[in-house]
Image: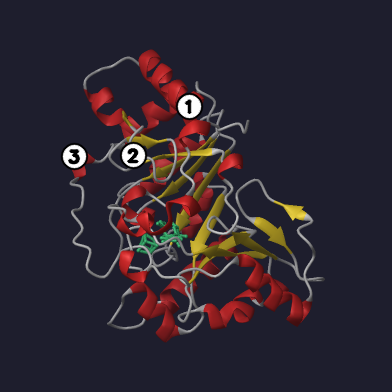
Amino acid sequence: MNKVDYLRISLIDRCNFRCRYCIPDDAELQYLLTPELLSNEELLKLIREVFIPTGFRKFRLTGGEPLLRPNLVSLVEAIAQLPEVEDLSMTTNAFLLEKVAVDLYQAGLNRLNISLDSLNKETFDQIIGNYGKSRWDQTWRGILAAYDAGFNPLKLNVVVIPGVNDSEILDLTALTLDRNWHVRFIEFMPIGNGDLFDERAWIPSEELRQQIRERWGLTEGEIQGNGPADVFQIPGAKGTVGFISQMSECFCDRCNRMRLSADGWLRPCLLNEADQLDLKTALRTNISSEILQQKVQHLLDIKPEVNFKLREMGSDLGQYSRTMSQIGG
Ligand code: SAM
Ligand code: SF4
């Protein structure tokens, strides 16, 4: 059985983008109010007294958009200073990154994953739901600032959407030729997005690999990372190309993670709401850390049986009520 030692922590459910694959066009989102979010103190207490004692060692900060979280740098610093924390990373859309990249690096953030779905400004704005001045340039400056600050390698996440950005696979892959960037193509998950779900809602990673193989050649999966991505490389390239294929190649059996929502719900699996734990209410009603450890341990014990198999859910996925930005992607 896989060791589960990785926690994805959503810091906030709000976002400054409205990516069409993440937030359906017609979604009326009810955002959490500040008192409903776990405070920095509560989060640190949970990490120190509950998650570390139950074996968690790797933490990823996400959202919504984590850069919208007030006092983010001091929170990062406090988590990074805990001696048991082996890896602290963040997933961001990079729009607000330029000014804060150096501070985050110096605060002890080890790694950054940045979402970048297109190199074409129009397509990018269309995907993120922006109808004003293009947001691509500022996002790109955020990416470069992160690389210059020392986030090396830098991971770029691309959600592949048929008919929208699938014509850019080779251009995005070419970013790995001269820089130590890891471009990762993610199969679109039609979660909460019933309208976008059809037979071709997602493109199997193997089709993308075939395109890249024909253009440059590709090592055959010799480089394996720790996470769900299958990692390949163009011969001679500085960076790598990864594929996260949760739709075509279910990797639930090697899942090593749980998710904590911004309002303190711990989920054993991305889509499993039935077994989630309300840690915020427990904290606020002074349930002891020992009891919380037992509850988390129970969730760890049952996780293999309660992992959802995305592929098997079929079109039920589209009816799923929460968006990725709310769950904490
Ligand atoms: N706002 C940050 C960002 O976009 O990087 C962090 C949160 S976002 C929910 C985390 C990741 O989830 C992003 O890489 C995004 O592309 C991915 N994501 C969101 N909705 C998705 C979907 N329906 N299918 C696949 N990936 C999705
Ligand atoms: Fe896009 Fe991330 Fe915001 Fe979702 S949370 S809308 S993926 S930027």
Residue at 29 percent of width and 30 percent of height: 278
Crowding at mark 2 (Cα within 10 Å: few <14, some 14-19, many 20+): few
Element carrying mark 2 = loop
> Label 3 sits on what residue type?
Pro
Element carrying mark 1 = helix
Number of the label disc, if any, that sits on residue 319: none
Give the alpha-carbon distance from disc 2 to disc 3, as whole Å.
22 Å
Crowding at mark 1 (Cα within 10 Å: few <14, some 14-19, many 20+): few
Pair 3/1: label in front: 1
> Label 1 sits on what residue type?
Ile
* Image coordinates for residue 179, horizontal then vertical, percent: 68, 70
Give the alpha-carbon distance from disc 2 to disc 1, as whole Å.
14 Å
Q: In which quarter of the image is residue 74?
A: top left
Residue hosting label 3: 35
* Image coordinates for residue 73, horizontal then vertical, percent: 41, 47
Relative to 79, residue 52 above or below: above
Relative to 208, residue 313 above or below: above
Residue hosting label 2: 273
Q: Is residue 65 visible?
A: no
Q: In which quarter of the image is residue 240?
A: bottom right
- Which circle's residue, 2 or 1, is located before the other in the chain? 2
Tell me if label 3 and label 1 are in contact, CB under 8 Å.
Answer: no
Residue at 46 percent of width and 70 percent of height: 199
Residue at 59 percent of width and 36 percent of height: 86
Number of the label disc, if any, that sits on residue 302: 1
Give the alpha-carbon distance from disc 3 to disc 1, as whole Å.
31 Å
Q: Could you tell whether 15 is left or right of 237 in the image? A: left
Q: Can residue 89 be seen in this view?
A: yes
* Image coordinates for residue 125, horizontal then vertical, percent: 37, 79
